[in-house]
Amino acid sequence: MSTARTLATAARVLRQLGHDPRSIALMIFVPCVMLFLLRFVFDGSPQTFDSIGASLLGIFPLITMFLVTSIATLRERTSGTLERLLAMPLGKADLIAGYALAFGLVAVVQSLLATGLALWGLGLDITGSARLLLLVALLDALLGTALGLFVSAFAASEFQAVQFMPAVIFPQLLLCGLFTAREKMQPALEAISDALPMSYAVDAMNEVLRHSAVTGDFLRDILVVAACALLVLALGAATLRRRTA
């Protein structure tokens, strides 16, 4: 793995994104729009917005980064760009790391805007530090990027890439504890929930929401999310194909 090749790949991806304003809008502004709508859905019950707003601050970036990354990576393969790149002295790890870096930079901007809007624009009331909230939002966006890179290897078209969302994202959304506490679920569902990274992302957001100090549970949660992102990136590099069959 070469740092120069990774940086060159990241720069190329960012240049391509610069010519695709719709993807930029989807990644950066859609989570902000969703939070804005959510705030006014619960306009008469600000406590409800406080209780779920922090969780969704992590979930929205994860979903948007998953969707855009999976489609963008698949487009590289179906257009033949990926095959030409891998014919050069560019390894799979360089390519995946470059994509992760490029989309990670976008995720930083996305997380900054969404967190700033939630806290200072929409009045999200948290007990913990805004920096910790931003950290979790960023890790969630990076996890979404990693998942998108991974599943793109198994899709033959952009339509199939979108179809992976119900299979990969929706079960995590239902079992992450957003709708009901995980300890109140059936034992089998709780066990599945314990194995899903989005559950720890939501738990970390809730720790920031409720506690002023960094807790042991918070550290565990962010370490699990970060480890899952790195693991999925490694799997993405291992399963990356030059072209779509």
Image: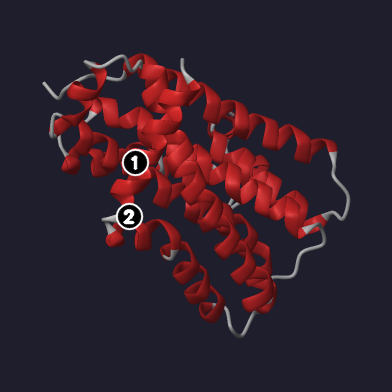
Looking at the image, residue 164 sits to the left or right of residue 81; the answer is right
Q: Quadrant of residue 129?
A: bottom right
* Residue drawn at x 28%, y 61% as measured from the top left: 22
Quarter of the image with the C terminus is top left
Coloured how? secondary structure
* Residue drawn at x 50%, y 42% as measured from the top left: 104
Q: Nearer the viewer, residue 205 or 99?
A: 99
Task: Please provide percent x and percent y for residue 235.
Answer: 42, 19
Q: In the rendered image of this protein, does residue 6 appear above or below residue 183?
A: above
Residue 85 in view here: yes
- Sequence-wise, the earlier of marks 2 and 1 is 1
Q: Nearer the viewer, residue 216 or 92?
A: 92
* Residue drawn at x 18%, y 30% as measured from the top left: 81
Looking at the image, residue 173 sits to the left or right of residue 217; the answer is left
Residue furthest bottom as drawn: 44
Q: Quadrant of residue 133?
A: bottom right
Looking at the image, residue 8 sits to the left or right of residue 138; the answer is left
Question: Badge 1: how crowded within 10 Å, few (<14), some, or many (20+)?
Answer: some
Q: What kind of residue is marked 1?
A: Val
Q: In the rendered image of this protein, does residue 90 appear above or below residue 201?
A: above
Read off the residue under disc 2.
18
Q: Secondary structure at mark 1?
A: helix
Task: Please provide percent x and percent y for residue 187.
Answer: 60, 31
Residue furthest right as drawn: 213
Q: How many marks?
A: 2
Q: Quadrant of residue 122?
A: bottom right
Q: Secondary structure at mark 2?
A: helix
Looking at the image, residue 186 sits to the left or right of residue 70; the answer is right
Q: What kind of residue is marked 2?
A: Gly
Read off the residue under disc 1.
13
Question: Badge 2: how crowded within 10 Å, few (<14), some, or many (20+)?
Answer: few
Residue 122 in view here: no
